[in-house]
Image: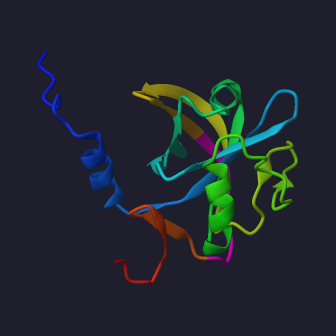
Amino acid sequence: MVDRFQGLDPDAFRSALARFPSGVTIVTTRSASGTPHGFTASSFAALSLDPPLVLVCLDRGADCSPVFMAGERFIVNIVTPAHAELAIKFATKGENKFANGAFEFDESGQPLLPDAAAVIRCELEQVVPGGDHVILIGRVHDARTGSGKPVTWYRGGFLRLGESAA
């Protein structure tokens, strides 16, 4: 098979993708030893209403990747503008991501953002390879909404809904 994208400029591809606004989530879980883990993801989507499934993409190279792939549960926290700095922290390797105390723990010990625009609690249904990422498919067993508006990621920065983009 001929690689039709052999001459693809990675920077041009990344720039093209940045023109697609997406929501911002902080995805969290807890390891078998009880340590909380998380990452920021803009690659999140509803997959199915019946059964209720969502998907989120995780970089294989992320420090938390093995924990999520081996875990049983994860939570998708849809962030608000108030969480922008926290989302940057969760997108950075080596950060002590849970140090600020913004998270609470549900009855199963999973970390969640109590003031998120929405909190979607999932059981890990399947892990699917996807290039340099894995696709975590979660069966939703609980979802609740908050009062805050979500924030979007566009051209390398946060954009509040209702604002005009440059």
Question: Which quadrant would the N terminus be assigned to in this image?
Answer: top left
Q: Nearer the viewer, residue 143 or 66?
A: 66
Coloring basis for residues: rainbow
Q: Which percent across, then down, holds residue 120?
A: 65, 53
Residue drawn 52% across the image and 35% down it: 59
- Residue 73, horizontal then vertical, whole percent: 71, 37
**Residue 155: x and y, percent?**
38, 63
Instruction: Report whether residue 144 is seen.
Output: no
Quadrant assignment, res 118: bottom right
Q: Is residue 4 above or below residue 52?
A: above
Image quarter in which the C terminus is found:
bottom left
Q: Which residues are magenta?
A: 139-148
Q: Position of residue 42 (x, y in %)?
A: 49, 53
Q: Is residue 22 magenta?
A: no
Say which residue appears at 60% left-offset and 49% top-offset.
91
Q: Is residue 105 left or right of residue 156?
A: right
Assign the magenta stretch its main secondary structure: strand
Q: Nearer the viewer, residue 129 or 121?
A: 129
Q: Is residue 114 visible?
A: yes
- Compared with residue 13, is residue 164 higher up or lower down, i.e. above or below? below
Q: 65 or 72: nearer the eye?
A: 65
Label total for image: 0
The residue located at (85%, 42%) in the rendering is 108
